[in-house]
Image: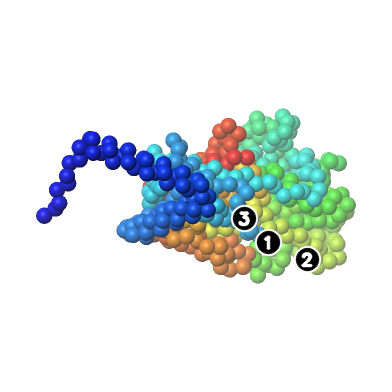
Amino acid sequence: MAAIPMKASSDSLGFAFANLVSMLQQMLQQLLQRPRILFLAIAATVCVNLVVSLIFLSSRPVTSMPSLSVLFQADSAPTLIFGVSHLEETSDRTWFAPLEKTSDPTTLWQIGASLPPAHSKVYAVPALVPKKRLLPLPSMDSFIFGVATSAERALPNLPVWSHWLKNRTSKHLSSPLIVSYHKDITNTREEKKSRSQVQRAAKRENLDVRFVPTAIKRYEQRVLFLLRELWVASSPKTKWFVIQDDDTVWITQDALLNLVSAYPDPSQYDLIIGAESETNTIHHGQIAYGGGGIILSRRLVQKLNADGLLETCYEKHQSVFGGDGMITNCVADTLGKPREEVLSYDESLHQLDFSGDAVKFFEGAPVVASLHHWNSWFSIFHNSHPLAERSYDSILLLAQTAQLVGYENFGRRFVLHGGKIAVHLGYTVVFYREPILPADLVPADSSMQQRFFTKASNMAEGTDRVTYFLVGISEEDGAAVGVYENGDGAQIRVLWQR
């Protein structure tokens, strides 16, 4: 039979409390007179509390769904806090915030596979200082862009082009974008209507989009002869010539400007900068793959426009796969060097020749200046994402996020709370059942297509990890606020203080 508790009188409780207070006062006076004993007492108390906490956490029952212990600062809007000075940088754009160096928590929250939508969390993420530039940053006025496509394909791409083309410092026209199209094949009523719509929309946005007709039917040849169209349309202030696909996206203007600022004066050197693609290289050799964008210096383009040179190049290399392959071979011939010696590859230019979704790529913390194939070969987000089937909205969401957080910060990884949380800035927030280690973030394969794929990104959703994808971005009081959502509709907010 259970013991029956005795009822204590108010007098006896008051007497006991007075004696307890008196005893504690005497103990405190003695401890203050002996600082060493005071220090040992505090240390012993901390150790006891730590042991009790560990026993409590280890004795918790295991549920069928992951139950992740995440520490938050107690507040009206619970905030995960970690100090800038405690972040440790590694070469793969990943920062580990050691658990023992984060702010002391006062509240323990249990986060499982789903968070109630009302329990949004705000993450205070430290800003990072961009790397120092080797040379002064150029302006967008020094660029001219070229693409071989139809007006029908240009029309849906125009909002995306506007993101990286529009003049952000004044109301003046943007850098020129030359659209080369075959004057006969694309001269249908529908094509004329699309061309008119593009021109009207471009005018409203102050975009300098110029349709240039050509008698050249073959697409690859039109790409090669963009070198001539761009040279004719350029001005003396044009220093950089960019040839790309209609689905090439520059994630921000700053990304492109910073990329070329690392190279010498384009009027004094012969430069061709391109993207790599290991899969294509196996079949077609080392060339500057145009999906990631091909950037050429002014002096080189001037040489390529010598009388009859492009015609000679085409006759010699017309069997080469792709207009970008023809351009690379033409540059090699003109400079009298092998293709391997004339190319400068840049890791921020991404051809992206893979299918499925891009989760493994973006969780690999890539440096991003350009993206390709985002509306054809793969989807930017997982198929559970509300924008999975809306590729244009998806790429604009990423581009706007990169604009707000800064291209140099976009995609960086922040591993928090001993490996239980990973923030892939501008893409996902992931909660792990078991803490991830630095080894889990090392690419399993060093090949071009797999160099961003890690063990952590291969973990099973719902059992080993719970993923919250970016679904919205806004600016509040000078900070970028991203909203991340999981498959059940639960949301987390990530605050990026610039």
Q: Neighbour class for label 1 at 10 Å: few (<14), some, many (≥20)? A: many
Mark 3 lies on residue: 88
Badge 1 is on which residue?
A: 276
112 or 76, which is in the foreground?
Answer: 76
Label 3: few (<14), some (14–19) or many (≥20) C-alpha neighbours in 10 Å: few
Tag 2: amino acid: Arg
Percent from the top left, x then y, of residue 365? 59, 55
Residue type, label 3: Glu
Q: Residue at x 58, y 61 (%)?
A: 452
Q: Is residue 389 visible?
A: no
Nearer to me, 63 or 386? 63
Judge by depth and name the residue closer to the eye, 477 or 297: 477
Looking at the picture, how far across and down is residue 2, in whole percent? 14, 53
Nearer the camera: disc 1 or disc 3: 3
- Marks 1 and 3, Cα distance to the nearest angstrom? 30 Å
Tally the marks: 3
Q: CA–CA distance between discs 2 and 3?
A: 40 Å
Name above or below for residue 199 compared with residue 417. Answer: above
Q: Mark 2: which secondary structure? A: helix
Residue under label 2: 339
* Quadrant occupied by the N terminus: bottom left
| Residue ID at (46%, 53%) | 41
Disc 2/disc 1 C-alpha distance (Å)? 13 Å
- Counting from the top left corner in percent of width and height, residue 160 is at 61, 42
Q: Quadrant of the C terminus?
A: top right
Q: Earlier in the sequence, mark 2 or mark 3?
A: 3
Q: Residue furthest left?
A: 1
Say above or below: 202 vs 405: above
Which of discs 2 and 3 lies nearer the camera? The answer is 3
Task: Kindly identify the amino acid type of the residue bearing the numbered disc 1.
Answer: Glu
Residue at screen point 55% across, 65% down: 439
